[in-house]
Image: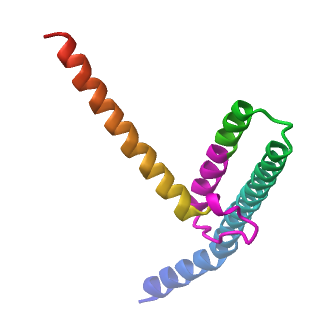
Amino acid sequence: MPVAIGAIVALVSLVVIAIPFIRRSGAVLSARHTGEVERLTRLRSDLYDQIGQLQADHAANTVTDEDYQHQLLELRIGAAETIRQLDQLGYEEEPQDAPAPLTRESLEEEIAALRQAGSRRDSATDEGSGSDGA
C-alpha cells in the first residue's frame, strides 16, 4: 500500500512539474500560428492594394494591355496562394476591402472554369494528334 501511495504522489508531482513546459510549448506554437496569420493577412492586403493600383494604372493608360494582363495574373495567383495558406491555418475571415473578383467563391469558380477549359483543350489536342497519325 505505501508503494502505491508513493507511486501516485510521484505521478502527480511529475504532472505538476510538466504542466508549465507543456503550456509554454503550446503558447509558442500559438504565437507562431498567430504571427503567420498576421503576416499572411498583411500580404493579402498588400496584394489587394497592388491589384487596385494596377487597375487604376490600366484605366489611366499607363500600363499596356499585355503588361496589365500579365501582372494581374501574377497578383491574382499570389492572392489565391495566400488565401489557400490562410485556409490551411484555419483562418477564414474575408477582408472587407477585398476586390469582388478575389473573394474565395469567385476564385474557386474561376479555377474550376480554367481546369475545365484546360481539360477540354487537352482532350481536343489528343483527338487532333490521334487523327494525324492515321
Q: Which colour scheme is used?
A: rainbow
How many dots with numbers?
0
Residue reaching furthest left?
134
In the figure, is residue 6 to the left or right of 28? left
Query: In front here: 15 or 49?
Result: 49
Residue 68: horizontal and vertical position, in percent? 73, 37
Vertical side of 112 occupied by 17: above or below: below
- Residue 95 highlighted magenta (yes or no): yes
* Residue sitting nearer the eye, 110 or 7: 110
Left or right: where 102 falls relative to 116: right
Q: Position of residue 82 (x, y in %)?
A: 65, 52
> Residue at position x 81%, y 54% from top?
49
Residue 99 lies in the magenta-colored region:
yes
> Where residue 47 appears, x then y in whole percent?
75, 50
Pick the front one: 9 or 131: 131
Image quarter of residue 48: bottom right
Q: Residue at x 58, y 77 (%)?
A: 15
**Residue at 57% across, 55% down:** 84
- Which range of residues does the magenta coloring cover? 76-102
Question: Hey, which quadrant is residue 71 in on the image?
Answer: top right
- Residue 14 lies, in percent from the top left, at 59, 74
Asked if 62 appears above or below 81 in the picture, the reply is above
Say which quadrant the N terminus sits in. Answer: bottom left
The quarter of the picture where the C terminus appears is top left
The residue positioned farthest toward the top in the image shown: 133
Residue at figure coordinates x 37%, y 45% from the top left? 116
